[in-house]
Amino acid sequence: CAPPDVGVWPQDVQQVQELAALCYRHDVPMVPFGTGTGLEGGVNAVQGGVCFDLSRMDRISELRVEDFAVAVEPGVTRKTLNSYLRSSGLWFPIGTM
């Protein structure tokens, strides 16, 4: 286990940009964290740094049924997305095995 040195919980894209710019200026590693549903062990701060916990960025901003496209922030879960899509007749089947 290699935990980060600190964690931050940005609420929107502007905050992510500002925090990322600060980390870049000071050569501090950044480790993104979405909703914790991954199985790949992606959150592993082998060089320390800042964990960007993006789970609070959970808005769905656009749905284009004709294109089968939806714009979501990184904190949107599959279940939340499918609840949102239910009335459109669409669904996001990944991870339903």
Image: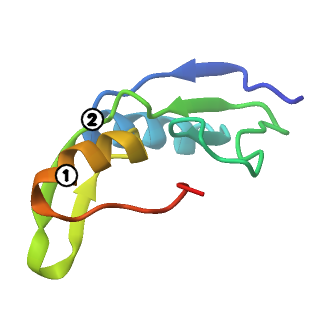
Q: Tell whether 75 sits left or right of 61.
A: right
- x then y, percent, for residue 68: 22, 75
**In which quadrant of the rendered image does the N terminus lie?**
top right
- x then y, percent, for residue 19: 43, 34
Q: Would you say residue 76 is visible in this rendering?
A: no
In three-dimensional space, the C-alpha distance between marks 2 and 1, rounded to whole angstroms, equals 26 Å
- x then y, percent, for residue 39: 72, 48
- x then y, percent, for residue 69: 22, 71
Q: Does 37 sit above or below residue 64?
A: above
Residue positioned 36% across, 43% down in the render: 17
Determine whether the residue tagged by mark 1 lies in a helix, strand or loop. helix
- 2 or 1: tag closer to the N-terminus: 2
The disc label shown at residue 44, or none: none
Q: Would you say residue 41 is visible in this rendering?
A: yes
Residue positioned 77% across, 45% down in the render: 41
Q: Does 3 sit above or below residue 90?
A: above
Residue positioned 58% across, 21% down in the render: 7
* Residue that badge 2 annotates: 12
Marks 2, 1: nearer the viewer: 1
Check disc 2 and give the amino acid type. Answer: Asp
**In which quadrant of the rendered image does the C terminus lie?**
bottom right
* Residue that badge 1 annotates: 86
Determine whether the residue tagged by mark 2 lies in a helix, strand or loop. loop
